[in-house]
Amino acid sequence: MRRMWWLGAGYVAGLGTAAWLRSKAREAAERYAPANVRNAVADRSREAAQRAQQSAADSARNLGREARRIADDIRQAVAEGRDAMRDTESELSRDDEPPTTTDRP
């Protein structure tokens, strides 16, 4: 009787394992069918192209922002340089004038 029980248990376990393996094999065969592989590759390449396009757009926006910031810095530096030049010119022109005396007898 024990042998029959173990024989039956082994038979049932074998059937269960065979059914499980058959379903896994069918899933793998379906997953790797040419049409499904083509669709998966197309989907992934489309997603990659969209990510690349978004990245390029973000880079262009960042580049424009950075160019404006640099242009603003240059304008500010030119304005500061002109102010410093005017200050220096006014100091030099004051030094060139002859001293005036207000004391006359």
Image: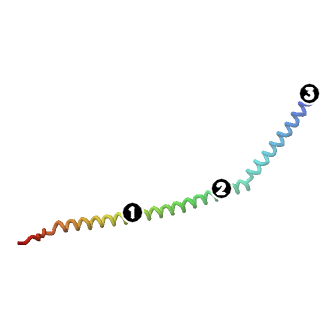
Discs 3, 1 touching: Cβ within 8 Å: no
| Residue underneath mark 1 | 73
For the residue marked with disc 3, what is the amino acid?
Answer: Arg
* Horizontal and vertical percent position of residue 25: 78, 45
- Residue ID at (44%, 65%): 68
Mark 2 highlights which residue? 44
As drawn, which residue projects farthest toward the front? 105
User: Counting other residues with Cα less than 10 Å from the Cα at mark 2, is it few (<14), some (14-19), or many (20 or more)?
Assistant: few
The first of marks 3 and 1 along the sequence is 3
Return the mark for residue 40: none
86 w.r.t. 47: above or below: below
Q: Classify the position of the N terminus by image quarter.
A: top right
- Circle number at residue 2: 3
Task: Decide: is 86 above or below 39.
Answer: below
User: Image quadrant of residue 86?
Assistant: bottom left
Give the amino acid type for the residue marked by disc 1 in the picture. Answer: Asp
Q: Residue at x 84, y 40 (%)?
A: 16
In the rendered structure, which disc, 1 or 2, sits on the residue that comes first in sequence? 2
At numbered mark 3, what does the secondary structure look like: helix, strand or loop? helix
In the rendered image, the residue lying farthest to the top is 2
Depth-wise, is mark 1 or mark 2 nearer the camera?
1
Q: CB atoms at circles 2 and 3 under 8 Å apart?
A: no
Considering the numbered disc 1 on the image, is that residue within a helix, a strand or a loop? helix
- Quadrant for the C terminus in the image: bottom left
Q: Position of residue 49 (x, y in %)?
A: 60, 59
